[in-house]
Amino acid sequence: MLKLKNIEKDQYDKFVNTHKTKSHFLQSLSWGEFSKSKKNLTPYYLGLVNEEDKLVGATLLLEKKLPLNYSYFYAPRGFVIDFKKKELVREMTKQVINYIKDKKAIFLKIDPDIIKTQFNYLNEEIVNNDWEDIFNTLKEVGFKHQGFTKNFETMQPRYTFRIDLTQSLEDIESHFSKTTKQRIAKSKKLDTEVVIGNKNDIHEFYHLMTLTESRKDFISYNEDYYETLYEIFNGNELSKATLFLGKVHINKTIKALEKNLKEINDQISILPIDNLSKSAKAKLQELTKQKDKILSDIEKYKDYKKEYGNDLTLSAHMIIEYGNKAWVLYAGNHNILSETYVNYNTYYEHLKYCKDKGIEIYDQFGTIGDLSENNPRLGLHEFKKKFGGNYVEFLGEWDYVTKPFMYFVFTKLVPIYRNLVRKKSKKELEHEIRKS
C-alpha cells in the first residue's frame, strides 16, 4: 500500500535530482525555497512511499493563498514519477488531491514535461509513442486538459529547444546554422571574451535584463529577485546557478582588426597592380572593400571607447544546472555592438561548459508554437533554432478541480473583473492626461 507524506528536504531533493526521467529544476528543493522567498508561495515536499517506506514518487506542491482562506496548488512540471505507470499516476493523483482538499484547495495545476511532439534540426519528427496513453491516463484520473496553447499563456513554456549533449561537440556544431557558425567565428576573431561571473556581477546582469526587456516587450524582475535566485541555487550542493558574461575589450578588438588589416594589405601588395587579370581585378576590388570596412570599424570602435570605456559587458546569461540537465533561464543583451556577435559566442561557451561538466540535456527554456510571420516572438524562436536543438512540444497544463464553483469564479469571473478594472484605470489615466 502506498502512502503520501511530508518528507525531509534532503531526502526529497536527492530523489528528484537523481530521477531518471523527471529530474527538473522546477521540482527542486532550491526552486521551492526560492518560490517561498520571492513568489509568496508555500512549498510542500511530499513523497509517495511503499510498505517498506521506500520512495516511489515525489512532488513539490506550491500553495497560493487566496481570499476567504481558499488556495490553489501547483506542481511545476508535474509529479516526479514514471507517467507510463498508470496505477502509479492514479495513486499519486488520488493521494495528492486528498492532501490539498484538507487545505481548502480550489484546484491543482500540473504541467508535466512529457513530450508530445519533437523535431530534429532537419525538421524530421522524432516519434514518441507514449504521449497519447499518458494523455488519456491523466483524463481518466480526473485532470482537465487546458488546451494546446501556442505562445506563453501557461505557467511554464509549452515549447522549447533541447540539445543532446551526449553527442560529440563536432556533431553538435554540425547542427548549427551556417550563419551561427560564421557569427561565432567572427566573435572569436574579434577577440571577444566569455567569463564566469559571481554574485557581484548580478547588478550588471540585471542592467542587461532591463535593456532586453525594453526592446523585447517582456517583464523582468527586480535585482533582488535574481540575486536571491542565484544565492539559493548556489547554496544547495545539488543545484547550481552560473552567470556567463560576454565581454568586449575594445583595445583588444582594435588590435584584432589591425591584424586583419595587415593581412589584407599584405595580400594587396603581392598583386601585380600594373598588369591585373580579370580575376585579379575582382580580388583587388573585394580586398579593397574589406579594407575600407575594417578602417571604418576601427574608427567606430574608437568612438565607442570614448563613450563607454574600454571594457564592455554585452551579454549576461544565467544557466541553471540540476540533475542531468541545464537550462538557459535568463539572457540579457546590450543594444550596442551587435556586430561583434558576443551573444552567439556566450551561448556557445556555456553550451561547451555544460557538455564538459557531463550535462546530458541543454534546454533553451522556452519558445513558441505559433510560427506565423506577425508573431512578435518569432525572432526569439529563430535565434534559438539556429543552434540545432530538437524542437520540443510538451503536453501542456492540466487542472484537477476540487471546488467547481470557486474554480469558475477564480478562473473566469475574476479575470474579467481584473480586466475591467485595468481598462477603467487606463481610461481614467488618459482623462487626467488630457485635462492636464
Image: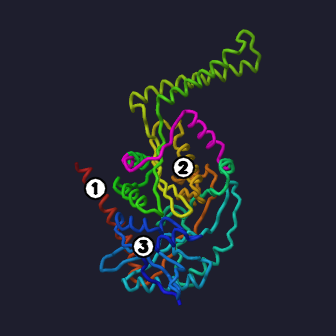
Relative image position of residue 273 (x, y in whole percent): 70, 12
Dot 1 alpha-carbon crowd within 10 angstroms: few under 14, some 14 to 19, many 20 or more? few
In the orientation shown, which residue stands out farthest toward the bottom?
A: 1
Dot 3 alpha-carbon crowd within 10 angstroms: few under 14, some 14 to 19, many 20 or more? some
Using the numbered discs, state the Cα–Cα distance from disc 1 to disc 3 in whole angstroms.
48 Å
Q: Name the kind of residue labelled 1 in the image.
A: Leu
Relative image position of residue 34 (x, y in whole percent): 39, 64
Q: Name the kind of residue labelled 2 in the image.
A: His
Q: What coloring was used for the rendering?
A: rainbow
Rendered residue at 72%/18% (across/down): 281
What SS does tag 1 mark?
A: helix
Q: Which residue is mark 2?
A: 350
Residue 186 forms part of the magenta stretch: yes
The residue range painted magenta reads 175-203
Residues 116 and 17: in front is 17
- Whichever of callouts 2 and 1 sits on the residue coming sooner in the sequence is 2
Marks 2 & 3, CB-CB < 8 Å contact: no
Residues 164 and 284: in front is 164
Rendered residue at 34%/65% (across/down): 37
Relative image position of residue 315 (x, y in whole percent): 47, 44
Q: Name the kind of residue labelled 3 in the image.
A: Lys
Rendered residue at 40%/54% (across/down): 220
Relative image position of residue 379 (x, y in whole percent): 55, 49
Marks 2 & 1, CB-CB < 8 Å contact: no
Q: Which residue is mark 1?
A: 429
Using the numbered discs, state the Cα–Cα distance from disc 2 to disc 1 in whole angstroms.
45 Å
Please tell me the numbered disc located at residue 9: 3
What SS does tag 3 mark?
A: helix
